[in-house]
Image (spheres, rainbow, N blue to C red):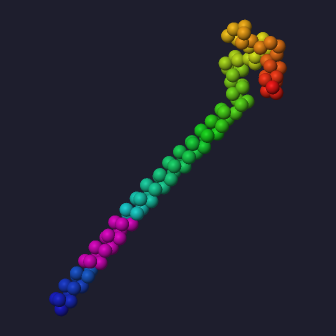
């Protein structure tokens, strides 16, 4: 009888250890899930920030935006015919610049 009781106690002890191990592993798995969910949330925030920055870059590279910044904030103006300056008189084209370019393109 004592032998059977010892086996039963051993079986209960082993069963208790297995149950405790299952509880510990379940708690560890829950902790990993929490960490994973935090990382997913952080990644979502970072991805949203990246998307926002990409939109800002695209809008800043827009030619209309560049033109508006150049004319409004920097005070730049469009050049007229008299706005061209040459290093020497020999470099200056005779006649209009467009005509010289046109002649050189077709000759």
75 in relation to 62, above or below? above
Report which quarter residue 19 is drawn in: bottom left
Instruction: Kindly report the secondary structure that dominates the magenta region of the rendered protein.
Output: helix
For the N terminus, which image quadrant? bottom left
Residue 42 vs residue 67, the one in the foreground: 67
Which residue is found at the position 82% from the left and 13% from the top?
Answer: 95
Residue 94 place in picture, x, y as percent:
80, 12
Q: Which residues are magenta?
A: 13-26
Residue 91 drawn at (x, y percent):
72, 12
Q: In this view of the protein, which residue sits in the foreground, 94 or 17?
A: 94
In the image shown, does 89 or 48 lie closer to the viewer? 89
Which residue: 70% across, 29% down? 65
- Visible in this render: residue 98? no
Locate the C terminus by quadrant.
top right
Asked if residue 70 lies left or right of residue 105, the reply is left
> In the picture provided, is 16 more to the left or to the right than 77?
left
Residue 102 visible, this angle: yes
């Amino acid at each position: 009888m004592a032998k059977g009781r010892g086996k039963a106690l051993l079986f209960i002890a082993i069963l208790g250890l297995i149950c405790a191990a299952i509880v510990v592993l379940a708690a560890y798995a829950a902790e990993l899930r929490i960490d994973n969910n935090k990382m997913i949330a952080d990644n979502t925030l970072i991805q949203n920030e990246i998307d926002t920055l990409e939109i800002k870059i695209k809008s800043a590279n827009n030619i209309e935006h560049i033109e508006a910044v150049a004319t409004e904030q920097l005070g730049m103006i469009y050049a007229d015919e008299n706005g061209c300056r040459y290093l020497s008189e020999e470099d200056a084209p005779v006649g209009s610049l467009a005509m010289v370019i046109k002649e050189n393109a077709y000759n």
